[in-house]
Image (tube, rainbow, N blue to C red):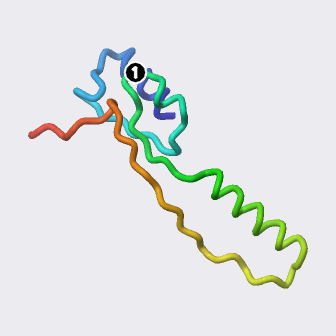
């Protein structure tokens, strides 16, 4: 969605990041390939998916197993060219 939004901004002749900063989420590889590069929040999706599968398989094997607990994973902000400091008003 962030990449489509950037395309819309550029078609409207709005400068990224001069007039609008854009930040994505999930760290898709396409964000690194476009210009300006998309600033994004990257999360460990493979680890998250592997853990979800493990919990699901355990629940399928044993219905009486404890309900899963919340697991927090670290995220990382990858700053690229699509963001800039806010302008003074």
**Number of numbered discs:** 1
Give above or below for 40 relative to 61.
Answer: above
The residue wearing badge 1 is 35
Q: Which residue is depicted at the point 39% across and 15% down?
A: 11
Q: Which percent across, then down, holds residue 40?
A: 43, 41
Which quadrant of the view contains residue 56?
A: bottom right
Direction left: furthest residue: 89
Looking at the image, residue 3 sits to the left or right of residue 44; the answer is left
Near-viewer residue (74 or 59):
74
Q: Which percent across, then down, holds residue 4?
A: 49, 26
Q: Which residue is depicted at the point 40% across and 28% down?
A: 37
Tell me the quarter of the image containing the C terminus. Answer: top left
Looking at the image, residue 50 sits to the left or right of residue 74; the answer is right
Give above or below for 36 relative to 45.
Answer: above
Looking at the image, residue 21 sits to the left or right of residue 76; the answer is left
Q: Which percent across, then down, holds residue 78?
A: 39, 43
Near-viewer residue (88 or 54):
54
Q: Which residue is depicted at the point 46% across and 30% down?
A: 32
Q: Which percent across, then down, holds residue 16?
A: 30, 26
Which quadrant of the view contains residue 47?
A: bottom right
Q: Which residue is depicted at the point 88% across and 78% down?
A: 62
Crowd tier of the residue under label 1, counting other residues whose Cα lies within 10 Å: few below 14, some 14–19, many 20 or above? few
Direction right: furthest residue: 61
SS for callout 1: loop
């Amino acid at each position: 969605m962030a990449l489509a939004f950037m395309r819309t901004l550029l078609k409207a002749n709005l400068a990224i990041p001069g007039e609008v900063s854009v930040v994505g989420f999930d760290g898709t590889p396409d964000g690194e390939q476009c210009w300006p590069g998309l600033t994004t929040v990257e999360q460990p999706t493979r680890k998250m998916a592997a853990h979800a599968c493990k919990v699901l398989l355990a629940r399928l094997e044993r219905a009486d197993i404890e309900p899963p607990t919340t697991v927090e994973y670290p995220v990382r902000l990858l700053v690229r060219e699509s963001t800039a400091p806010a302008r003074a008003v």
